[in-house]
Image (cartoon, helix red, strand yellow):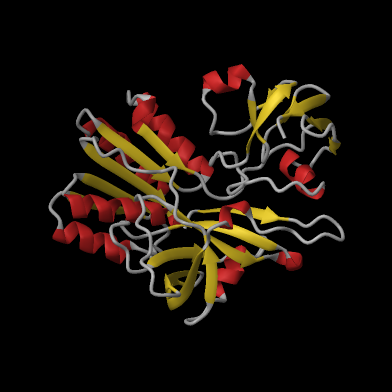
């Protein structure tokens, strides 16, 4: 999938508590591991006991507990590829990233019979059920939530146009999408292995969609930015554009600042190059978090004093102007000091 990750780092001489997202965790067992490409595998999970698996909204993530580098525990979220209706199993597809923090290597090392803990599925990329049509666009491993959307659209008889952009011969879920389109007249599927060809086709496709179509895109940041920019140029209103990021965006290290915790008066320094979330964790604070990219809203904290330097994509323009909250995984402080509701 499209993957978002959270890392729980223990302060020195202190054991890190369980990630807040894993409270009330599901106990799962690996039922199958299916290679998709030389560096992508699909992992199937079933409930470890007799309980039913919770259903989920298309486009949902499954946060799986993983072992990372340096013996740290990570909670990585990967897109579920099923439709979400009465699931008998959960399936994720994961791109191995050898230069990452270890989560994808952990997933690639799973074998049938292995047990894992996972949070209940959640989504910030759900389909708008009242949409006249769904235009679903993916690049590379970003196809995973798009596949979930396509399966749901097929089940409910909703119109959808699916476009998958990938290198020649490396479409990890192209066979499933071809089958969905072949057996459901409401679904059409287009593959592109050339970015220039895709860009030309996209311009035409954007102008051909009926009023009321919603666009969903998942892939690398620059790819999504280009797709959304083309849609806006073609006259698409913002409320009909939806995206899900994956991978860690590159942010500048920022200026140092400090925070005071309103409940205790504790003062915590946040040096340049370290996030507010990391500084709070190093001070022993257990902050709910998931994406560490400013997209999920899990790590939102209230601000009592000081001006946040917002670098997230979760808060609305109105919420940013209020300066009453901050996404501590990416955002910083404009002022040298800030007081948090913590």
Residue 127 visible from this viewpoint: yes
Q: Residue 234 in the image: state x and y as whole percent.
A: 33, 26
Residue 97 visible from this viewpoint: no
Q: Residue 211 in the image: state x and y as whole percent.
A: 21, 28
Identity of the residue drawn at 79% across and 21% down = 335
Identity of the residue drawn at 75% across and 21% down = 306
Q: Return the residue found at the far front.
A: 263
Using the image, determine if residue 44 lies above or below residue 287: below
Using the image, determine if residue 231 lies above or below residue 292: above
Identity of the residue drawn at 78% across and 61% down = 15
Identity of the residue drawn at 35% across and 46% down = 137
> Left or right: where does residue 212 sit relative to residue 69?
left
Image label count: 0
Q: Return the residue found at the far left.
A: 185
Q: Quadrant of the C terminus?
A: top right
> Left or right: where does residue 274 sit relative to residue 155?
right
Q: Residue 128 in the image: state x and y as whole percent.
A: 30, 38
Is residue 249 or residue 285 the one in the foreground? Answer: 285
Q: Residue 2 in the image: state x and y as whole percent.
A: 48, 54
The image quadrant that residue 329 belongs to is top right
Is residue 128 or residue 96 the one in the foreground? Answer: 128
The image quadrant that residue 67 belongs to is bottom right
């Amino acid at each position: 999938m499209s993957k978002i990750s959270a890392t729980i780092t223990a302060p020195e001489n202190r054991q890190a508590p369980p990630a807040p997202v894993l409270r009330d965790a599901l106990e799962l067992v690996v039922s199958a591991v299916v290679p998709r490409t030389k560096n992508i595998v699909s992992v199937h999970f079933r409930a470890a006991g007799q309980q039913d698996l919770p259903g989920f909204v298309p486009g949902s993530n499954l946060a799986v507990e993983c072992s990372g580098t340096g013996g740290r525990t990570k909670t990585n979220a990967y897109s579920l590829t099923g439709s979400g209706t009465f699931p008998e199993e959960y399936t994720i597809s994961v791109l191995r990233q050898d230069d990452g923090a270890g989560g994808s290597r952990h997933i690639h090392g799973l074998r049938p019979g292995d047990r894992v803990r996972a949070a209940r599925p959640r989504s910030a990329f759900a389909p708008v059920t009242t949409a006249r049509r769904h235009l679903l666009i993916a690049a590379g491993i970003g196809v995973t939530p798009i596949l979930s959307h396509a399966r749901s659209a097929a089940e409910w008889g909703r119109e959808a146009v699916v476009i998958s952009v990938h290198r020649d011969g490396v479409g990890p879920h192209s066979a499933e999408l071809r089958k969905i389109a072949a057996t459901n007249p409401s679904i059409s599927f287009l593959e592109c292995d050339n970015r220039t060809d895709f860009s030309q086709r996209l311009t035409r496709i954007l102008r051909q969609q009926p009023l009321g179509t919603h666009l969903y895109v998942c892939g690398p940041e620059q790819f999504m930015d280009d797709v959304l920019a083309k849609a806006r140029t073609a006259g698409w209103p913002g409320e009909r554009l939806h995206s899900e990021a994956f991978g860690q965006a590159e942010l500048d290290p920022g200026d140092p600042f400090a925070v005071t915790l309103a409940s205790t008066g504790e003062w915590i320094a946040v040096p340049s190059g370290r996030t507010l979330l990391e500084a709070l964790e190093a001070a022993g604070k257990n902050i709910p978090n998931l994406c560490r990219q400013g997209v999920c809203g899990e790590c939102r904290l209230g601000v009592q004093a000081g001006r946040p330097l917002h670098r997230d994509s979760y808060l609305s323009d109105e919420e940013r102007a209020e300066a009453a909250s901050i996404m501590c995984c990416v955002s910083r402080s404009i002022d040298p000091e800030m007081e948090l509701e913590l």
